[in-house]
């Protein structure tokens, strides 16, 4: 939220009105595998957190491919291969785009971009939702790609 677009979020000052970022309080959401896919509070896994964030951005019709799929990584892999028409790969991510990560060649994680470099996602290690700077080398090598839901920026 330092890319200029969101410079007023979360602090006061001057005569400009303060607007609250609808995603700000998602940081610290407790991590729980398989949780949060259809709720707006409580624990969430990475896909649950993404769905929650997209709803907070005002997009209730975000596609859901999770029915009958037990693990998020299966959804991400199947969703991108079978439903790729809903998502467009992008090289310059922006707020609301998905970031898909891989480990050992396998897709294993998804998050939502807050701006060009920062992603909101869950962390098993910390046990909660965090913000990570994906420009750092440790993260750059894990990113499979950035994807924009075609309905997100067409409104």
Image (spheres, rainbow, N blue to C red):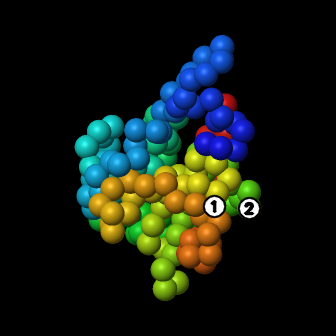
**Quarter-wise, where is residue 92 in the image?**
bottom right
Nearer the observer, 4 or 122: 4
Label at residue 36: none
Label 1 packing within 10 angstroms: few (<14), some (14-19), many (20+)? many
In the figure, is residue 124 to the left or right of 154?
left
Give the residue pinned by disc 1: 146
- In this orientation, does residue 85 appear? no
Which quadrant: the C terminus? top right
Give the residue pinned by disc 2: 91
> Tag 1 or tag 2, which sits nearer the N-term?
2
x and y percentages locating residue 102 in the rendered image? 51, 75
Nearer the observer, 21 or 86: 21
- In this orientation, does residue 19 appear? yes
Where disc 1 sits, the SS reads: strand
**Quarter-wise, where is residue 124 in the image?**
bottom left
Q: Residue at x 29, y 65 (%)?
A: 70
Which quadrant: the N terminus? top right
In the figure, is residue 149 to the left or right of 122?
right
In the figure, is residue 108 to the left or right of 84?
left
Nearer the observer, 81 or 146: 146
Tags 2 and 1 in contact by the CB under 8 Å rule? yes
Q: Is residue 50 above or below residue 22?
A: below
Q: Is residue 74 above or below residue 130?
A: below
Q: Residue at x 70, y 44 (%)?
A: 3
x and y percentages locating residue 73 in the rendered image? 41, 69
x and y percentages locating residue 119 in the rendered image? 54, 55
Q: CA distance from mark 2 to mark 1?
A: 7 Å
């Amino acid at each position: 939220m330092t890319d200029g677009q969101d410079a007023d979020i979360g602090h006061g000052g001057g005569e400009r009105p303060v607007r609250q970022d609808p995603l700000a309080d998602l940081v610290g959401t407790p991590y729980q595998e398989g949780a949060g896919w259809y709720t707006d509070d409580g624990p969430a896994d990475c896909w649950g957190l993404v769905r929650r964030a997209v709803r907070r951005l005002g997009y209730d019709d975000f596609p859901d491919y999770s029915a009958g799929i037990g693990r998020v990584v299966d959804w991400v892999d199947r969703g991108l291969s079978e439903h790729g028409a809903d998502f467009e790969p992008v090289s310059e991510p922006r707020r609301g785009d998905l970031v898909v990560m891989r480990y050992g060649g396998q897709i294993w994680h998804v998050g939502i971009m807050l701006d060009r470099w920062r992603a909101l996602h869950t962390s098993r290690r910390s046990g909660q939702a965090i913000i990570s700077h994906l420009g750092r080398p440790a993260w750059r090598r894990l990113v499979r790609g950035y994807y924009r839901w075609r309905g997100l920026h067409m409104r």
